[in-house]
């Protein structure tokens, strides 16, 4: 017996102001994905710093935005690239998975951009999409590029705190968002082109053990960014469907959060707010950040990456 799905209506937390919408600027997303449709911005990669500021990326125009608790936008960095996933380090540094440039480190004080793991460091580089830090400092990220059912060669990597790169999977048709369960015994992976979420359990030695299907979506284009709560429930943005779903740890749908404008480009999620029970959602084509209140707080993000990254 499946539970009844509860609908939660979100509110608008913030919106990209007109002066930061670059409608007349060319970008690869407009050319390659949206068939020439102008894009003033395309938000992704939400992540909070310790002061409660929300950071998001603008994939279309290579920008990093900082959004205050009152919803005001500030441009932290503007560079030549295609940022997607973003996470905040415990010392305040910003780490970005960039489709063109690899894993980047961005200084929030001056916007300086430096390359941590470049395309030349990853044989057969396709184009990075998202990233996640485990509590021990290991960095997981997806190499998605243009992979799909016709080219199921997308990959998941782990970069350990000793600076060694490990390819965990190399047969994925569109690896996208990723997050670990609270006990960090398995990794959940959004596989966009099959419209589903894979579960990657780990053995005690860190190797992958018997990857399986956790959830199969219907409609839209596929799952995108994801977040975890303290009870092991998984929230995921369903791109092309215009909603966020929250699945129980058993894989049953519990909540649906629809985009109030009917926009189909719900791309990513992050927990925040005073009690960490608010889910913030990037509605990418509308230029809005949505906010929904959930009963269970999000799993705290711990992006400490140890001595290896600190020494860079």
Image (tube, helix red, strand yellow):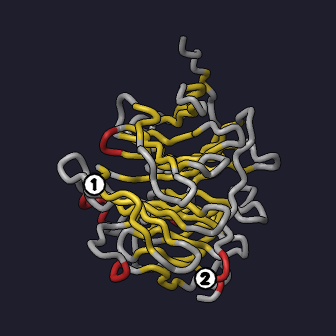
Picture layout, residue 95 above or below residue 215: below
Along the horizontal axis of the image, is 131 left or right of 128?
right
Q: Earlier in the sequence, mark 2 or mark 1?
A: 1
Give percent across and percent down for residue 2. Answer: 54, 15
Residue found 57% across the figure and 29% down from its top: 250
The answer, for residue 91, to whether it is visible in the render is yes
Q: Name the one closer to the observer, 170 or 291.
A: 170
Q: Which mark is residue 33?
A: 1
Mark 2 or 1: the one toward you: 2
Picture layout, residue 307 above or below residue 196: below
Q: Name the one closer to the observer, 259 or 275.
A: 275
> Which corner quadrant holds the C terminus?
bottom right
Q: Splitting the image into 4 quarters, where does residue 238 fall?
A: top left
How many marks do you count on the picture?
Answer: 2
Q: Name the one closer to the observer, 287 or 215.
A: 215
Give percent across and percent down for residue 50. Answer: 76, 65
- Residue at the far bottom: name it: 311
Residue found 56% across the figure and 32% down from its top: 247
Picture layout, residue 219 above or below residue 71: above
Q: Which mark is residue 235?
A: none
Q: Splitting the image into 4 quarters, where does residue 120 fall?
A: bottom left
Along the horizontal axis of the image, is 122 left or right of 148?
right
Question: Helix, strand, or loop for circle 1?
Answer: loop
Along the horizontal axis of the image, is 213 left or right of 309?
left
Question: Helix, strand, or loop for circle 2?
Answer: helix
Give percent across and percent down for residue 27. Answer: 32, 67
Q: Which residue is mark 2?
A: 308
The answer, for residue 72, to whether it is visible in the render is no
- Mark 2 and mark 1 in contact? Answer it, CB < 8 Å: no
Q: Splitting the image into 4 quarters, where does residue 211 fall?
A: top left
């Amino acid at each position: 017996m499946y539970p009844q799905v509860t609908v939660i209506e979100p509110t608008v937390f913030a919106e990209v102001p007109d002066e930061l919408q670059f409608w007349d600027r060319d970008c690869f997303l407009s050319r390659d994905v949206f068939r020439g449709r102008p894009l003033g911005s395309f938000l992704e990669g939400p992540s909070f710093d310790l002061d409660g500021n929300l950071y998001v990326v603008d994939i279309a125009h290579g920008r990093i935005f900082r959004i205050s608790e009152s919803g005001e936008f500030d441009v932290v960095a503007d560079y030549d690239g295609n940022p997607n996933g973003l996470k905040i380090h415990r010392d305040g540094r910003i780490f970005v998975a960039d489709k063109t440039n690899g894993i980047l480190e961005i200084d929030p004080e001056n916007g300086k951009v430096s390359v941590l793991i470049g395309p030349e460091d990853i044989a057969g580089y396709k184009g990075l999409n998202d990233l996640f830090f485990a509590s021990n400092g290991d960095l997981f990220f997806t190499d998605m590029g243009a992979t799909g059912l016709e080219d199921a060669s997308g990959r998941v990597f782990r970069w350990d705190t000793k600076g060694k790169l490990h390819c965990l999977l190399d047969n994925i048709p569109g690896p996208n968002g990723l997050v670990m369960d609270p006990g960090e015994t398995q990794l959940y992976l959004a596989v966009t082109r099959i419209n589903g979420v894979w579960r990657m359990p780990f053995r005690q030695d860190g190797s992958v053990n018997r990857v399986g299907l956790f959830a199969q979506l219907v409609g839209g284009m596929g799952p995108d960014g994801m977040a975890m709560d303290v009870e092991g429930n998984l929230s995921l943005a369903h791109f092309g469907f215009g909603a966020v779903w929250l699945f129980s740890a058993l894989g049953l749908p519990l909540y649906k959060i629809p985009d109030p404008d009917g926009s189909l480009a719900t791309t990513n999620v992050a927990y925040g707010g005073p009690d960490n029970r608010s889910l913030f959602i990037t509605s990418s084509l509308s230029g809005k950040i949505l906010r929904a209140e959930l009963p269970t707080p999000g799993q705290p993000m711990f992006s400490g990456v140890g001595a290896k990254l600190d020494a860079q």
